[in-house]
Amino acid sequence: MLKNNPEIGQELLNVPMGEMIESMAISIANAQMALDSNSIEVAEMMGGLSPVKSEINGKEFINFKDSRVFFGKEKVSLAGAVESYNASRDEAYRASINDKIKDDVEPLYDKPVVNVDKAPTDNSAVFTPDNKVNTEVYYRKSATEWFEYDGSAYTSIATPTTTSVALKSGTVERTIYIPQRLSMLELGFSPTFYQFVDTIIKVAITIKFKREGSSSFNYKRDSKSTDRSASFSWRKGLKTNKTVTTSQVNANYSQKYSYSAEGSSLLQTKLVPIPPPAALEERIQLQMELAREEAEN
């Protein structure tokens, strides 16, 4: 009865404490790495260039997208606006600058353009400005009629394409205002890095051992009597009584036994933002001063 009782000490020793702590610690380390990776991506975006990954023929390529934001306007020269237009590949930014300079610029092709009043094959064609045959220029009769000289003959070509512009000859320099694009770092923002601190790993196990036993014995007696009599004469009578008694005994026995084990674990940690390092703030300030100096000069 109540044999093979659990040994509480052994039950505690059987708990894989080391594995549980190791697993929790590795989970925290992996979470920290994921947070740092995300913060680095945010820092790249705030710096003005966001990496964009693409795959071509099974190979991975990384390009960069301008992630600066429009913030106010800046005063620049007409030539400076043309330079900003040619340097940017952001269509929205180029369109905003083009609205300011479109009347003062013309497409900039990979070779100079010489205007002709007739097709160069016509002997009476007039070349502007010097009327000389040259393999290093394009000849333009109209917006859709272009020619090129290969050293021996003129050939008709398609309209050269270009994404750059140049100031028209004789354009007067002036000051204009164009939208200003700045990175988040230049606006004073800085990426936030997080770190787990005050980490508490708590493992608890509760073992409950309970034994209950009870027994009871009930005794109950019931008696029954049977009387018998006999007579031999009216004068002499003989009477005999017999009694039969029966007794009933009720007995019962009961026993209870219970055992339970409970385990629990608790992982408590605090996630706090880490302030940007002083070296980063100094470097950002220096870059802003250099950019301001370059713009002024």
Image (spheres, grey):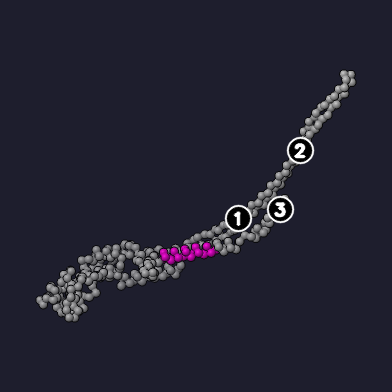
Please give the residue where the numbered disc 3 appears in the rendered image.
3
Percent coordinates x, y for residue 29 in the rendering: 52, 64
Q: Is residue 274 visible?
A: no
Asked whether residue 203 is in view, the answer is yes
Q: Are marks 1 and 3 in contact (CB under 8 Å)?
A: no
- Which-is-in-front pick, marks 1 and 3? 3
For label 2, the residue is: 249
Determine the residue positioned at 19% across, 79% down.
Answer: 150
In this picture, residue 211 sits left or right of residue 155: right
Residue 22 pos. (x, y %) = 57, 64
Amino acid type assigned to the residue bearing label 3 in the image: Lys
Question: Which is nearer the N-term, disc 1 or disc 2?
Answer: 2
Residue occupying image coordinates x 39% and y 70%: 59
Task: Identify the secondary structure beneath mark 1.
Answer: strand
Q: Earlier in the sequence, mark 1 or mark 3?
A: 3
Amino acid type, residue under disc 2 in the picture: Val
Q: Amino acid at mark 1?
A: Gly
Q: Position of residue 226 (x, y in %)?
A: 80, 28
* Secondary structure found at label 3: loop
Range shown magenta: 25-43
CA neighbours of label 3 inside 10 A, class few (<14), some (14 to 19), many (20+): few
- Quarter holding the C terminus? bottom left
Residue beneath label 1, please? Answer: 263
